[in-house]
Image (cartoon, grey):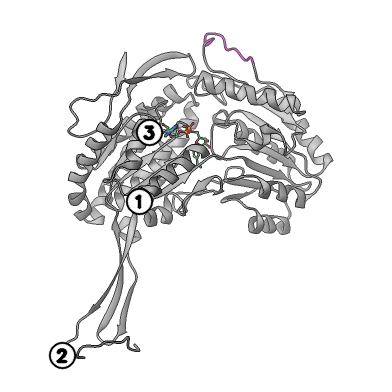
Amino acid sequence: MKTISHRISGLSASGGGHTPVFNPATGAQTAQVASGGAAEVDAAVAAAARAFPGWAATTPARRAKVMFEMRRLLEARKDELARTISDEHGKTHTDALGEVARGQEVVEFACGIPHLLKGAFSAGVSTGMDCYDQRQPLGVVAGITPFNFPVMVPLWMIPMALACGNAFILKPSERDPSAPNLLHDLWREAGLPEGVLSVVHGGKAAVDAILDHKGIAAVSFVGSTPIAEYVYARGCAAGKRVQALGGAKNHLVVMPDADLDLAADALMGAGYGSAGERCMAVSVAVPVGEKTADALVARLKPRVAALKIGPAGDAAAEMGPLVTAAHRDRVAGAIESGVAEGAELVVDGRGLKLQGYEKGYWLGGTLLDHVTPRMTVYREEIFGPVLSVVRAADYGQALQLINDHAFGNGTALFTRDGDAARDFAQNVQAGMVGINVPIPVPVGYHSFGGWKSSVFGSHGVYGPEGVHFYTKLKTVTARWPAGLRAGAQFHFTER
Ligand code: NAD
C-alpha cells in the first residue's frame, strides 16, 4: 500500500497514524496518507522560520524567476498533475486540466511581483522630507484547502505568498493528498529553496495546531462554511491575520428575453460539471415567469437525463463520481428531503450503477422543479449534481431571492436587456457576478471572494488582494536636511 508522506524539511519520523485514500471511480483504497498534528506542524514551522530570512531577502526579481520556472513546469507536467487529481478526486481529465490551467494563471500573475510590490512615493511632503510605502512579507503563513480543487486552490495561495517573500505551510485535504505533494515537488524543482514550502497532511489536529501556533502569522482557508467560521474565530483569537472562504449556493437568473438555449447550455456545464462539487457551481436556476420556466425545464430535462457519467479515463464522460461514498449518500439524502418537502423530481440520478465500476461513488444528474425558499434543499449547500429550479414571478422577486440567501459567493444573470444587467450587477448581494457568464471566477489578475456566509475576513484571494493579504504595509517618512537645522519642535507644523 502506497503511503503519502508529509513534505517537511528535516522531519525524520512522524506519528499520528494514517488515513485511507480511495479512488472514487472504483471505490478501492489506493493509498494511505500520513495524519499529522502538533509535532509535524512544529517541524514545518521550524523549517519555514529557518528559510524565511533568506527568502525574504531574495530580491523580488529573483523570486519571480522561480515563478517563471514553475509556470513552465506546470505546462510541461499538466497531464501528470491532472491524472493525479482525477485518481483521488474523480473529476474528468479535461476538467482536471482546466483546474491546473486556472491555478497556473495565478503563477503567471505572481511573475509580475517586482511591479506588484512597487510602493507609492511622495517627494517633498515637507521641506527636505519624502514619504514612501513598502510592502513587507508577514513571515511564516499557512493555507488549509478543500478536496474539490487539490491543485487550483493551493495555487490561489502559494504563488502569492511566496512571491511576496513569505514561507508557506500547506495543509491540503486528506481526501486527495497526492496532487499537493506533486505540486510541492514541482516548486522545489523550479528552484524554491528548502523549507520555504512544506506540506503537512492531516485533519482537525493539524488544523488546530496551525491555528494555535505562535510562529504562524497568517492563515488562508478555503472549505465549508462551518469550518471557515471556526478557523476564522480560532485563528483571530490567536492573533493571526485570517481569510476564510466558505460554502455557496449560486443562483443563475434566466430573464424572459434570454437566449434559452444559451442559458440551458450554461446551466448544464455550471450545474453538473465536476459533479457539482465546485464552490462556484450553479445549484439554483431562477427562471423569471412561468413561460420561461416551462421552456427552460423542457430543455434541461432530456439533457440532464442523458448526461454522460464515467471515470476520468473515459474521454466522453461529462462528469465523474462524487468524492466519497458518505458524500454521495448525503447528496442522495438531500434529494430525498427535497421531494419530501414538496419539490417535483423531474430527473432522479439516484441508484446509478456503472458496469465495471460497481463500487464507485456514482450519482446521476438530478433536476428538481418547484423548489421554494423554505426547503432545506434550497437553504443548504448540497455540493453535488443537483439543480433546483425556483420559479420567480418577476425580476424583482428573483433579485430579492438571491439577496435573502445566507450565502453570497457567485451569481449570474442571463438576459439581452442592458438595463436589467446593470441593475443586477449593481444591486445583487454576492461577491462575483456573471452577466451571461455562468461561472464568473475572476481571472488571475483580479481577486476571488464571496460575500455574506461565503467568506470570513476582509481580503479576497489571489490577484491584488493576495498581495495585500500576504504583506504588511510600512510607510517611511525620511528627511535629508542638507544644511537645514530646524531645532527641536514640540508641535506639528504646517507642511
Ligand atoms: P471541509 O470544510 O470539510 O474541509 C476543508 C479543510 O478543512 C480540509 O483541509 C479539512 O481537512 C479541514 N477540516 C475539515 N473538518 C475540520 C474540522 N472539524 N476542524 C478543522 N479542520 C477541518 O471542505 P471540503 O469538503 O474539503 O470542501 C468542500 C467545501 O469547500 C464546500 O463547502 C465548498 O463550497 C467549499 N469551497 C469553497 C470555495 C470558495 O472559494 N469559497 C472553494 C472551494 C471549495
Circle 1 is placed at which residue position? 239
Q: Assess disc 2: are there few (<14), some (14-19) or many (≥20) residues with their C-alpha within 10 Å of its C-alpha.
A: few
Circle 2 is placed at which residue position? 483
Q: Residue furthest right?
A: 291
* Image spot of residue 237 (x, y percent): 39, 48
Q: Is residue 24 left or right of residue 390?
A: left
Q: Assess disc 1: are there few (<14), some (14-19) or many (≥20) residues with their C-alpha within 10 Å of its C-alpha.
A: some
**Secondary structure beneath disc 2?**
loop
What amino acid does circle 3 point to? Pro
Q: Quadrant of the N terminus?
A: top left
The answer to which of marks 3 and 2 sits earlier in the sequence is 3
What amino acid does circle 2 point to? Gly
The answer to which of marks 3 and 1 sits earlier in the sequence is 3
* Image spot of residue 288 (x, y percent): 78, 45
Circle 3 is placed at which residue position? 172
Foreground: disc 3 or disc 1: 1
Q: Assess disc 3: are there few (<14), some (14-19) or many (≥20) residues with their C-alpha within 10 Å of its C-alpha.
A: many
Front residue of 111/465: it is 465
User: At 40% across and 52% down in the image, what residue appears?
Assistant: 466
Front residue of 397/255: it is 397
Front residue of 38/50: it is 38
Q: For residue 460: magenta?
A: no
Query: Magenta stretch: dominant SS?
Result: loop
Q: Is residue 176 left or right of residue 385?
A: left
What segment carries the magenta color? 351-358
What amino acid does circle 1 point to? Gly
State whether label 1 is within 8 Å of ligand 1.
no
Q: For residue 357: magenta?
A: yes
Q: Is residue 316 left or right of residue 123?
A: right
State whether label 3 is within 8 Å of ligand 1.
yes
- Examine the rendering and report whether any part of residue 171 can be seen: no
